Amino acid sequence: MLVSFYNNNMLKRVNRETIDNLNNEQLMVLYANNKNNAQRAFAVLYERHKGPLYRFVLKSINNEAQTDELFQDLWFRIIQHKDSFNPKQKFTTWAYTIARRLLIDFYRKQGKRFEQAFDEAMPEHNEEPTGSYALPEQVLQQKRHARALQQAVTELPPEQREVFLLFHEGDLSLQQIADITDQPKERIKSRYRYAVKKLKNTLQVLL
Amino acid sequence: MTHKDSNIDQLYQEGNKAQPPKDIDDAIMARAQQANQPTRLGPLRPWLAAASILFAVPILWLMLGQPELQQARQESLQPVPVPSVPLSMDSAKPDTEAKPTPSAETDDPQDSEADQSKITASGARIRYQDPESETAGLNAPAPAEKRNATAEQEAVEDNLMDSTPASYLSLNSEKQKTSESMEDLIEQLKPDKLTETELALWQSLEQQVKNQQWSEARQTLKQLKQQHPSLDISRLEDRLEYLLSEFRP
């Protein structure tokens, strides 16, 4: 009996470790099939993607209160449609497609077009270093550059900003972005190139 | 250029550490757990479906196995025509080719020969109807048939209690037709030669019949018979008696 108890605990421990090592698609399938450790699989998946998805929404609508609401709605939709997830598809592509559609719906309710929404200046979203006098000069300069970049990103044209956010926040490939936005890959590549060029120019001027 | 610009990426990630609030994390995790919890009726669903089928199928089977129920239901939805009241006493010959009153049932001649009587279904009641009484409205009611006709008339009056205003109109028109037939009868029996008193009485009789004043008409008839004993007005008397019994106010 003692051996059996030991084996069960070992199995649980191995399963937990295995879950942590699963890729996004496997985690989603595990959660959707409601097998053992489904909740754990979802927790791992959520932990991996909550930050990038939250920031993608936040930088898209420039409003923290509405970002919370949209972000929650996004994950509720992922949960609701878990059975329709195709394991052959990348989880990130699926999740960011849902996020993008939610944003488009949001802009429509606001009476704006998707492109117009990006034209609004983003409020300064920073974590002001309290007691910065204690930090070394190099770190302070790095922070200043980072803030300047955040500001520069908000000033990008809407299409370029969308590609930049999906590329850096969602960690998506250009091909995945092309699939999500339903645009040719070359056009996406071109948008990203222009975005980076513009950011570098802006940073040079600001700094 | 498909790779990230390392400097830009590093700088971007530096000032980009926003995370969702803790309460949203908890709400999403709770929803995820709730979505995978089985519902209370979940395991019972197949049994509930089987039980409902077991309950519904025998009932449908019983209903389909009894066509009488469906036929009766269809018939009960059809309106029943009001039976006709005897119209004239002057038709000397019985109309043997008279068609029976249409009823809710389809009358097959062979069936009507086999059945001595039939039941007419109506929305209000099921009433026994003697097949002979169907043609009574076209024949002068003989003393033996009078009971049948009276019963039929009573049925008409009973129907008035729960029928539509159209039935009232129908009865009024029957009365109108009856007075008209009496006027014809008076016209037929009118003697060629009458004294002035008899002529006055005859004219008042005509007027009373026209106004459906049956009691007064009977009195006038008695006076006429006293004045002119050879006058053959027995048919008029019979008819008046019948009308008095039928259309008593």
Image: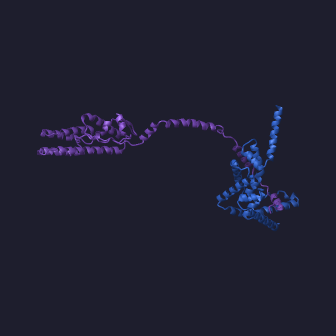
Chain colours: A blue, B purple
Residue B189, located in which quarter of the rendered image?
Answer: top left
**Which residue is at 24% across, 38% downward?**
B242
Instruction: Give the camera-side residue of B249 and B151.
Output: B151
Quadrant in which the N terminus of chain A is drawn: top right
- Residue found at x 19% / y 44%: B186
Q: Position of residue A90 (x, y in %)?
A: 75, 53
Q: Nearer the viewer, residue B212 or B176?
A: B176
- Residue at the location (24% across, 36% down)? B142
Figure disc tally: 0
Which quarter shows the C terminus of chain A?
bottom right
Which is more toward the observer, A157 or B19?
A157
Position of A66 relative to B81 (above/below): below
Q: Position of residue A71 (x, y in %)?
A: 71, 53
Left-right relation of A69 to B156 = right
Q: Nearer the viewer, residue B57 or A189?
A: B57
Left or right, B224 with respect to A163, comes to left
Res A185 → quadrant:
bottom right
Residue A202 higher or lower than B183, as above or below: below
Q: Quadrant of residue A143?
A: bottom right
The location of residue B161, given as percent across then percent down, is 35, 39
Question: Which residue sits furthest top?
Answer: A1
In this rendering, position of residue A43 left or right of residue B178: right
Place of residue B127 in the rendered image (x, y in percent of width and height, measured from the top left): 37, 36
Residue at image position (65%, 59%) is: A108
Q: Is residue A123 visible?
A: no
Residue A100 visible? The answer is yes
Farthest residue to the front: give it.
B110
